[in-house]
Amino acid sequence: MIKENFIKLYEHSFRDNWDLPCYADYGTDISFTYGEVAKEIAKLHLLFEHCKLRRGDKIALIGKNNTHWCIAYMATITYGGIIVPILQDFSPNDVHHIVSHSEATFLFTSDSIWETLEEDKLGNLRGVFSLTDFRCLSQRDGETVDKFMVNMNETFERTYPNGFSANDIIYTDLSNEKVMLLNYTSGTTGFSKGVMLTGNNLAGNVTFGIRTELLKKGDRVLSFLPLAHAYGCAFDFLTATAVGTFVTLLGKVPSPKIITKAFEEVKPSIIITVPLVIEKIYSNVIQPLLNKRGMKWALSIPVLDSQIYAQIRKKLIDALGGRFKEIIIGGAAMNPEVEAFFYKIKFPFTIGYGMTECGPLISYSAWDEFIPGSSGKILDIMEARIYKEKPTDLLGEIQVRGENVMTGYYKNPEATSEVFSEDGWLKTGDLGTIDENNNIFIRGRSKTMILSSSGQNIFPEEIETRLNNMPFVVESIVVERNNKLVALVYADHEALESLGLDKESSLKTIMDENLKNLNAIVANYERVSQIQLYPTEFEKTPKRSIKRYLYDNI
């Protein structure tokens, strides 16, 4: 059991960092110090007390990353409620289901999302509040929520006649064993389950971030991953708030242009990201340099290559704000070619591994200890093993146990029993190996692995990575059709148009060449029989993983 009480981490932080900047909405003049956030939390606690909310009542939260999102989350957990963050990319039907299934009492939502929801499908909510200004958007018949919110400031002044100070920050005493978070997953299999995370699970992640000094008092972070997802939430938000870091919330889709400008202005101390974001920056900043005339010749000369790589490294670091100590990449597989290039130029990056069910962290290594091809070293508060169906199997499933592992899925004992082994290990669904130094190496998902007619294990993600690096391919999925591999490809139509090429005739020629080149570099049993063009981008989860199940039978 983690010694530090999860809720008390924030009681101490809001007191100790009272005058420091806490949260800001990027591109606006909206910002809060730690003391101002504590004051807003105290106001929401008065609302919860007025409505006689009990410890363990659920409060749902959906909207883009912003200061009020963070305040609503913090107010809920420090009161002793259970927070239910919902990814804003979820469809209205999914939101209706989650709010109802979780038995949420209150809902905090952005105004635009509220307009898409149907009140009669949201269970038994007592009140709905805007993430713009916390005004009451709706209340159940007989409730006095709206009236209370209108008169909130007067109530607050009566409660704290001498003003609200750091000494007034006293949060609930709640054991770390209690469930404090329900996180509904958005996987590539189409199922949404409520992961129950305790204070101990959350404290395991946060205290790891504190012990390893990922973030410290006075550091700065740019939060652009959805905070409703475990990865961004654990470090950009929860760890940051526990130590006195200043969090700037992007609140926009992190396109290369937008995020590069934000990095330049915020100058973050650490960057938490997914591969897609960093790979786009690589293709926009680095590849144009590598493709310059004479560059390949220059890189072939030993004296010049180290100088050129140093310049490229500096340009990339400057493009990301110039002041970060490392970039932590997680959430999906990294393009091996990009990873190899970053390692070659000594770029300060590392790749971690986790899942929502572990809140999320399972493994991590600092960038200067990172082993290429791995996903870091298993945390000291976690254990991992490779489970093989047969002793002769080369690969097995990664299974874990330890402080970060969830208690189960909410109101879903069947799914809970399925995901745990008989001896209590969490089945990750990932196939891989662990070396003698406890580094994890992931090969692919057990659910996506294809068994060839000759008995070989085929990991479609590995073939897709190679295909995605070929000309005019934006993204791809490799599927099995009649015992043969077929690649669905979404082509780069903009690039074709910019070169003045006829799409229909040119694409067939290009993809035929890509198919030939692909099959020349994969194993015989991995060869693709045909490339089938797909008209649009593939539908993705908020983590930017393709929803593969949608394309199995196309």
Image (cartoon, grey):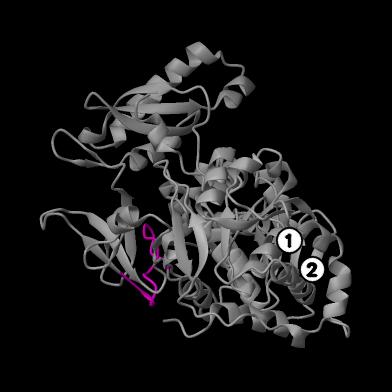
Is 172 rendered above or below residue 31? below
Quadrant occupied by the N terminus: bottom left
- Estimate the x, y position of residue 480 in percent, counting from the top left: 28, 29
Q: Residue at x 43, y 51 (%)?
A: 193
Q: Position of residue 12 (x, y in %)?
A: 65, 84
Would you say the magenta stretch is mainly helix, strand or loop?
loop
- The structure residue drawn at horizontal position 60% and vertical position 47%, both measured from the top left corner, is 281
Q: Are marks 1 and 2 in contact (CB under 8 Å)?
A: yes
Q: Name the secondary structure under disc 2.
A: strand
Residue at the image point whose x is 54% and y is 49% from the top: 100
What x and y, as percent, mark residue 391?
Answer: 11, 58
The disc label shown at residue 32, or none? 2
Q: Which residue of the protein is positioned furthest toward the bottom in this rendering?
A: 167
Q: CA distance from mark 1 to mark 2?
A: 8 Å
- Vertical placement of residue 73 versus 136, above or below: below
**Disc number for residue 350:** none
376 is within the stretch colored magenta: yes
Residue 143 in which image quadrant: bottom right
Q: Any magenta on residue 477?
A: no
Q: Which residues are magenta?
A: 370-383
Residue at the farthest front position: 142
Label 2 is placed on what type of residue? Phe
Say left or right for 75 vs 530.
right
Q: Tell me: 167 left or right of 91.
A: right
Label 1 SS: helix
Is residue 167 visible in the rendered image? The answer is yes
The residue closer to the viewer here, 510 or 79, is: 79
Circle 1 sits on which residue?
A: 67
Q: In this rendered view, identify the residue nearer to me: 121 or 387.
A: 121
- Label 1 amino acid? Thr
